[in-house]
Image: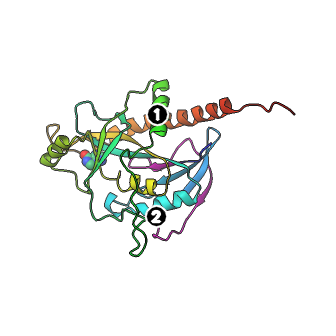
């Protein structure tokens, strides 16, 4: 069974349900990761947790060392990654506090170290990124949510902006016309880097607010915090059930030897 890494975003700097075994600091060829890998056990499974913005939460989206983070998780033994992220809701179904498991990405970020294949003299490499998230892992999460009867939305396009400022109303309208349902600041290059290292990766978002221009008035921090708190309780339940299901399927896969 695969070792799972959870990347926690805004509103999830630690996993309450994790029984911590050790904190491991990794040095990488790309510099310092955001935080130590917290290695522990959840529902009988080895889990590695990484706080994307550091713990305490001090690293802004454009300053995150995404390459070091994914590299460190690989060093720690991650075989699949569930990335949790706060987003704004653009289209009408994307209501605040809801958990959404997106299917596609449009990248509007810029100036970030976004590839491991950056050496000048190395052979040019192009990863396939037609479907940026691992579909099998996505379906496993969706199944877990369905069993819990959580009110998740199981598709959608994630638009990744540069931040740290929020968007203008016109930018959000343009993103909506492009096909985006959600807007966040950390989805890329994280997903592409995981693909470059061949680690199946899925994103699980919590809607913190309506995106710019989608409601009257300003987007406020108290509103964001309230919605994130509500959504993150669903995320914690979802993750726990995900590991319970994996544990069960591992037992179901087990076929006893024919001879002793
Ligand atoms: N825009 C970008 N990122 C976000 C937002 C938003 O409105 N809310 C939470 N993360």
Which mark is drawn over residue 191? none
Examine the rendering and report whether any part of residue 221 can be seen.
Answer: no
Ligand 1 under 8 Å from disc 2 Cβ:
no
Q: Residues within 10 Å of mark 2 (few under 14, many from 20)?
A: many
Ligand 1 under 8 Å from disc 1 Cβ:
no
Can you say which quadrant of the picture contains the N terminus? top right
Q: Residue at left 40%, top 49%?
A: 9
Rendered location of residue 260, percent (x, y): 87, 34
Give the mark nearest the N terminus, 2 or 1.
2
Disc 2 element: helix
- Residues shaded magenta: 5-34
Tag in front: 2 or 1: 1
Magenta region, main secondary structure: loop
Question: As drawn, which residue projects farthest toward the front?
Answer: 123
Q: Along the line of sight, which residue is nearer the eye, 37 or 217?
A: 37
Q: Is residue 141 left or right of residue 189?
A: right
| Residue 17 sits inside the magenta stretch | yes
Examine the rendering and report whether any part of residue 90 can be seen.
Answer: yes
Which mark is drawn over residue 139? 1
Disc 2 + disc 1, Cβ < 8 Å: no
Judging from the image, the colouring scheme is rainbow
Q: Is residue 47 above or below residue 29?
A: above
Disc 1 element: helix
Which mark is drawn over residue 68? 2
Q: Residue at left 28%, top 34%?
A: 94
Q: Residues within 10 Å of mark 1 (few under 14, many from 20)?
A: some
Rendered location of residue 107, percent (x, y): 28, 52
Can you tell which quarter of the image residue 189 is in?
A: bottom left
Q: Is residue 88 above or below residue 32?
A: above
Rendered location of residue 239, percent (x, y): 51, 38
What's the distance in space between the residues labelled 2 and 1, CA to CA? 28 Å
Q: Is residue 25 above or below residue 83?
A: below
């Amino acid at each position: 069974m695969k070792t799972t890494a959870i990347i926690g975003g805004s509103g999830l700097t630690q996993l309450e349900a994790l029984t911590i075994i050790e904190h491991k600091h990794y040095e990488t060829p790309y510099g310092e990761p955001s935080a130590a890998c917290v290695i522990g056990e959840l529902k009988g499974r080895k889990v590695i947790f990484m706080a994307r913005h550091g713990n305490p939460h001090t690293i802004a989206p454009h300053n995150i060392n995404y390459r070091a983070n994914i590299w460190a998780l690989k060093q720690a033994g991650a075989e699949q990654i569930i990335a949790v992220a706060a987003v704004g809701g653009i289209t009408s179904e994307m209501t605040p506090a809801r958990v959404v498991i997106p299917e596609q990405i449009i990248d509007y970020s810029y100036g970030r170290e976004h590839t491991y294949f950056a050496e000048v003299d190395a052979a040019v490499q192009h990863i396939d990124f037609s479907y940026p998230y691992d579909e099998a892992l996505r379906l496993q999460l969706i199944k877990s949510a369905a069993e819990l009867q959580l009110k998740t939305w199981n598709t959608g396009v994630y638009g990744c902006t540069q931040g740290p400022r929020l968007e203008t109303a016109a930018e959000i309208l343009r993103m909506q016309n492009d096909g985006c349902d959600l807007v966040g600041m950390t989805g890329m290059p994280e997903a592409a880097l995981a693909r470059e290292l061949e680690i199946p990766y899925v994103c699980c978002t919590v809607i913190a607010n309506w995106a710019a221009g989608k409601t009257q008035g300003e987007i406020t921090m108290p509103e964001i915090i309230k919605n994130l708190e509500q959504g993150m309780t669903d995320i914690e339940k979802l993750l726990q059930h995900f590991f319970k299901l994996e544990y069960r399927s591992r037992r179901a896969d087990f076929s006893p030897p024919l001879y002793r």
